[in-house]
Amino acid sequence: MAYTQDFRQKIVDLYLSGHSTTKIRKEFGVPAATITGWVKKSGGQIRTGLDAYSTAEFRQSIIDLYMSGITSPKIHKDFGVSEGTVTRWVKLSENRVRNHPYTRRSDEFKRKVVDLYLSGVPSPQLAKQFGIADKSVRNWVYAFGESVRTIHPTVLSPDGTSKTCSLCGLMKLLEKFAINPAGVGGRHAACKSCHKKRMRKTKYGLSSEDFDNILNIQGGVCAICGKKAKESKHTGWYVDHDHSCCSGEYTCGKCVRGILCPTCNHGLGHFRDNEELLSKAILYLRKHRETTAIVETISKAS
């Protein structure tokens, strides 16, 4: 495979900045021997011994993250450094490796997470962001003498046709709740409407006001087809975000692009947000529309 000079220089710069050949190989598919060959040709120094994996500055940054309370699995996921390598670097720096599950986090780290929770960040979002269990967030809140955000008790109506929502506290018909055999009345604790609002906040960082503002800017219609939700094939709205920024289930909240109907949202997803594919699809439709017109003309003439 032929590599451009710009690409080679990019790989060399990554290596010289502290990235390991293993990480570069996994990310760009360039063999380790090729990487070191490019570095030698550029006049760069090949790391040996402990420095072969990364620079001293990079190792120290990993150690500092670990000592601040970030777990080795989280570091492995973010930086591509194996958990064993993280603990080995920590030991070589004469720091203590955390062993007991209840000493995995420093009090400063726990306090930081608790403060974020009290500021309004949902516990599932904190769990995803810091690589901790959702339950741990609530336990730390209790440990610091704080209160977990109030959740309304779910109560079934005497006739068994309604129940209270755990989030808004309103009595609603059971059909307003998603099915959950283990829940009260065979339904989820939160109604569908409140559940959607909570997931928008958790996944996209959008409050109900933020969501309404975006929809109002769009004129209350889908940003692509211009239809209202009730005019769509399916019900409800979808929050669209830039997958090149956040490819996972949760987003940073800064890459939200707009609000779409289900059909348009699924369409973008199937085309993987690829402008080239969308352009080809347009050309394909135009081509066959012209072909169809020609066939109809010939049929009429005959």
Image (tube, rainbow, N blue to C red):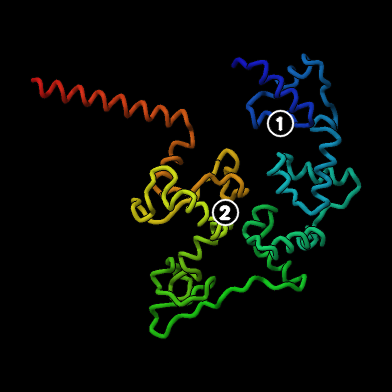
* Residue linked to disc 2: 203
Q: Where is residue 68 in the image (x, y as percent from the top left)?
A: 81, 52
Q: Position of residue 72 (x, y in %)?
A: 75, 48
Q: Which residue is drawn at 38% across and 43% down?
A: 225
Choose between 246 and 61: the one closer to the eye.
246
Q: Where is residue 153 in the image (x, y as percent from the top left)?
A: 55, 78
Please, what is the three-letter code of the amino acid marked with disc 2?
Answer: Lys
Please, what is the three-letter code of the amino acid marked with disc 1?
Answer: Thr
Q: Residues within 10 Å of mark 1 (few under 14, many from 20)?
A: some
Q: State whether residue 15 is above or below residue 237.
A: above
Choose between 278 and 48: the one closer to the eye.
278
Image-quadrant location for residue 286: top left
Looking at the rendered image, the quarter that the N terminus falls into is: top right
Element at badge 1? helix
Q: State whether residue 234 is above or below residue 171.
A: above
* Residue linked to disc 1: 22
Element at badge 2? helix
Q: How many marks?
A: 2
In the picture, the disc for residue 75 is none
Q: State whether residue 33 is above or below residue 212.
A: above
Choose between 235 and 28: the one closer to the eye.
235
CA distance separating discs 2 and 1: 32 Å
Q: Is residue 159 left or right of residue 101?
A: left
> Which mark sits nearer the N-terminus, 2 or 1?
1
User: Which-is-in-front pick, marks 2 and 1?
Assistant: 2
Q: Where is residue 171 in the image (x, y as percent from the top left)?
A: 45, 77
